[in-house]
Image (cartoon, grey):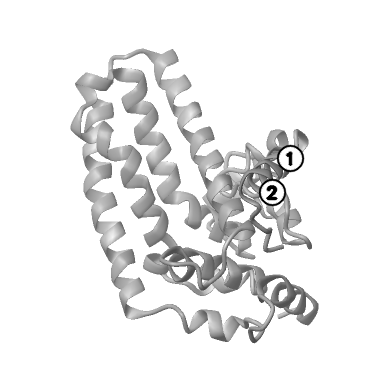
Amino acid sequence: MNTAVEGAGQDEASPVGREPETVESLEAGYTGAHRRYEWLGLGLAALSMIGAAAGAWHHADAGVLVWFVAIVAGIAVADLVSGLVHWGFDTWGSVDTPIVGQLAIRTFRQHHLDPKAMVGHDFVETNGHNAMLSVALTAPAAWAPEVLGAGPTIFLFFAGLFIALTSQLHKWAHMSEPPRAIRLLQKTGLVLSPDSHAGHHASPHDNGYCVTTGWMNGPLDKIGFFRGLERLIQAVTGARLNR
């Protein structure tokens, strides 16, 4: 691992008065309970996704335009959600933050110290968290497709599907040799590519937060979306950035 990157990450992630965080100390925070949570997320997501897919299929005759708009909007919103979550855990809190500190912030800290570490994670560790998050979107599509109607049901299914896929797509963007089909999707810009994601791993890691497809990074970075959110939160709460 590049020692310059590691040192920078430690400086950013370590509150005053604490020992600097290391890849090893953060990896040690991955517990059996955490693993069981990930398995639970995958199980719930699978059930919810199957139901949401059936709900979307219920509206198979909705028309090409409805399907196209709902799919593109769902994927774009999934990308936006990935950016908001990524930015939130990069920017606020610490590994000592109740609940989310060890559950989520820890993994983001580790990723900035060693971006390639996730390449070695298995399917469960890679995808459990995002799978759990996807349930919030796919469950309504599974339970009430007739009430929601065609567009919202299809939208929720694809938004939930791509949220569930986010960490896998992020992982592939860090692999030197992802599957051939994924390389093609990366080259065409349909999913996150190594080149488009590389800028996020240059200090101070304050852009390119969206890691599903990366579609939203250009517009959000151009208008200073996340910097504006930071200023607003600081003005209202007085919270300090952890960068």
Helix, strand or loop at mark 2:
loop
Say if residue 58 shows up in the picture.
no
User: What amino acid is at disc 1?
Assistant: Asp
First of labels 1, 2 by sequence position: 2
Q: Residues within 10 Å of mark 2 (few under 14, many from 20)?
A: many
Q: Quadrant of the N terminus?
A: bottom right
Label 1 – label 2 distance at C-alpha? 7 Å
Residue shown at 28% from the left, 71% from the top: 36
Closer to the camera in the image, 128 or 31: 31
Say if residue 29 shows up in the picture.
yes
- Percent x, y for residue 38? 33, 65
Closer to the camera in the image, 243 or 107: 243
Which of the numbered marks, if any, corresponds to residue 208? 2
Q: Quadrant of the C terminus?
A: bottom right
Residue shown at 24% from the left, 57% from the top: 43
- The vertical placement of 84 against 28, above or below, is above
User: What amino acid is at disc 2?
Assistant: Gly
Q: Which residue is mark 1?
A: 221
Instruction: Report if the CB atoms under discs 1 and 2 are less than 8 Å apart.
Output: yes
Closer to the camera in the image, 193 or 87: 87
In this rendering, position of residue 122 left or right of residue 224: left
Residue shown at 63% from the left, 37% from the top: 216
Q: Residues within 10 Å of mark 1 (few under 14, many from 20)?
A: some
